[in-house]
Image (cartoon, rainbow, N blue to C red):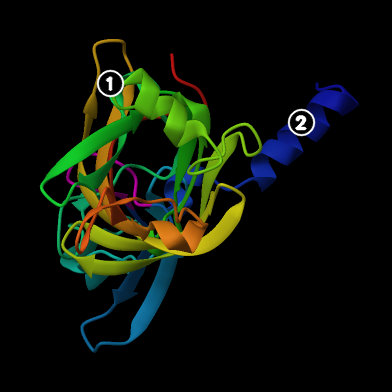
Amino acid sequence: MYTSQEQAGRSATASRPDRQSARGLHGVIRTKDGWAVQHAIVTVTDLTGQQVARAEADAEGVVSTGPLTPGVYTAVATAAGYTPAAMTAIATGSGTAELGTVVLARQGGVDLPPPGIWTLDPAHCTIAATAQHLGLSTVRGRFTQFAGRIEVGPDPETSSVAADIVAASIDTGNGTRDDHLRSADFLNAAAYRMISYRSSGLTPAGPDRWTVHGTLTLAGVQRPVDLDLAYLGTGPDPWGGLRAAFRARTELRREDFAMTYNQVVRAGVNLIGSTLKVELDIQAVQGASVP
């Protein structure tokens, strides 16, 4: 004899279908590096080409449909930015079909880092600017204090970048020159402590390359600035984290940011060139903070 509570439990158990027996086509969608391809779509068609099932991958890359009629099917996995993959699936008498792990290759290049927040590691990043000096050589400086984050989206074009640089941290290796660069003639670091960049979108520019569109705020002036961005790869670090590397380049016109100071040293030659070449070599750590 069962108590009323036990009987209710037995009835509830009996009313629930067996999850394993109810499962149809099942698989896991991954990149070649083993990352889940979130929101990938698997479409299942029969031998006549008629669609019989469609499923979207979850956050772990898992796709699952309801039971299928026993037989042979074609399953096609697709995802934005990836090359579609087609495979044969055979449904058994129980209606199940196992795809196993399906590897999707990213179109036009290597696989991107997994989606989520990535934090710049200042100890392994360089933000540098180069200016022409006397029309003959160059002077190179770098900023030593900054912070930033990259948010990688499921689709590369939905990713974003935000960075803040302490203007007074400019270092060219010459104290007198650095003080002048911090003055109102250039960075005006006393009045405008931070240099900031906020992206507004990305456009593909080739295999593993994008143009990052955004706004640069420098010396109190805001201007649209595009970055030429290259993705260099992802790998583990010795501290148990995961790192992604990027390189970005752009050129700035000093007059666009009200930096018009100059001296003519001889006919047609200025002390400082009118453009700055900005180079960023970036390592970002997966997660919201650097360990």
The residue carrying mark 1 is 173
The residue carrying mark 2 is 9
Q: Is residue 28 magenta?
A: yes
Q: Main secondary structure of the magenta part?
A: loop
Give the x, y percent position of residue 212: 38, 60
Nearest to the observer: residue 229 or residue 240: 229
Name which of mark 1 and mark 2 comes first in the sequence. Answer: 2
- Vertical placement of residue 228 versus 2, above or below: below
| 187 lies left or right of 135 | right
Region of the chain picked out in magenta, as a range:
27-37
Q: Residue at x 57, y 34 (%)?
A: 189
Nearest to the observer: residue 277 or residue 286: 277
Give the x, y percent position of residue 196: 54, 44
Give the x, y percent position of residue 67: 42, 62
| 104 lies left or right of 239 | left
Task: Choose top left, top right, bottom left or bottom right for residue 2.
Answer: top right
Task: Choose top left, top right, bottom left or bottom right for residue 77.
Answer: bottom left
| 283 lies left or right of 178 | left
- Amino acid type, mark 2: Gly
Q: Is residue 9 magenta?
A: no
How far apart in space, not on screen, are marks 1 and 2 (Cα)? 76 Å
- Amino acid type, mark 1: Gly
Q: Is residue 125 visible?
A: yes
What residue occupies the far left of the structure in this picture? Answer: 136
